[in-house]
Amino acid sequence: MGNLLCCVQVDQSTVAIKETFGKFEDVLEPGCHFLPWCLGSQVAGYLSLRVQQLDVRCETKTKDNVFVNVVASIQYRALANKANDAFYKLSNTRSQIQAYVFDVIRASVPKLILDDVFEQKNDIAKAVEQELEKAMSAYGYEIVQTLIVDIEPDEHVKRAMNEINAAARMRLAANEKAEAEKILQIKRAEGEAESKYLSGMGIARQRQAIVDGLRDSVLGFAVNVPGTTAKDVMDMVLVTQYFDTMKEIGASSKSSAVFIPHGPGAVRDVAAQIRDGLLQGSSTSTNM
């Protein structure tokens, strides 16, 4: 009906290209326009002014000979004031943009090793955007944004990179574990040394207390029982302790203590040994 009435409707965010007898005449803005087809006027086509997106997947090689697939996302749109250039100068806009993206990526990535490609993807995207802006502005298009959305190395390379990373983390974990064990061993050794030191002090004090107690007992017995010597009193005390010890050993069914030689007649020898030990302990305590 619109064609019969010589009226054309142009939608929002769209422009129409008006021709007269096949020659470009004007760019029609959104709205209703009168086109007398009987005078040779017609709409050659429509051009969208909306932002469009093109994803370009490019395979290339890095400086360290690793093949990667680089995915670039190009956002572009036609300029309203250059709609006639955008409509007439390019027959396939998407193919033209793709060719420029291939050219820039395959010129930039081979200069970088794989790790640098990941780190400098923004620089690659900027280089692609600058080249596209310079080239496509002559055809009436504006490059809104260029993004490197994905970098995919070969599957074997990805697996090797993951293994390298895992090995590095395991090595770090092993170092940390070794340091922790080292600290534990040092602390354990310090604790054992401190424990032995305190145990030695306790034994020395115990021996000193035994010596002091025996001395007081001997002196008290010698005073109360005239005619006895300190040696006699010490032998009697040791015999008494001997029998008390044997009684305690006999009362226990699971005791594994054995005295050699065994018998009351050997108490004198045992007494001499104990006396020498106590005197040595007393001398050691006094020196400390």
Image: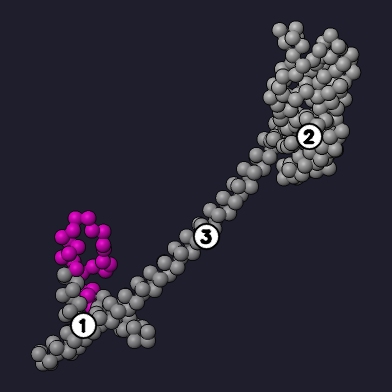
What secondary structure is found at the residue carrying circle 3?
helix
In the rendered structure, which disc, 3 or 1, sits on the residue that comes first in sequence?
A: 3
Residue 129 visible in this rendered orientation of the protein: yes
Q: Quadrant of residue 179?
A: bottom right
Measure the alpha-carbon separation of dots 1 and 2: 106 Å
The label shown at residue 182 is 3
Measure the alpha-carbon separation of dots 3 and 1: 46 Å
- Identify residue for label 2: 142
* Mark 2: amino acid: Glu
* Mark 3: amino acid: Lys
Residue 88, percent across and down? 86, 23
- The crowding category of the residue bearing disc 3, from other C-alpha atoms within 10 Å (few below 14, some 14 to 19, many at least 20), is few
- Identify residue for label 1: 213
Residues in magenta? 245-269
In the rendered structure, which disc, 3 or 2, sits on the residue that comes first in sequence?
A: 2
In this rendered view, identify the residue nearer to me: 124 or 280: 124
* Mark 1: amino acid: Gly
Residue under the image location 79 percent in, 15 percent down? 35
Residue 283, percent across and down? 34, 85
Left or right, 277 with respect to 66, comes to: left
In this rendered view, identify the residue nearer to me: 264 or 165: 165
Left or right, 191 with respect to 173, comes to: left
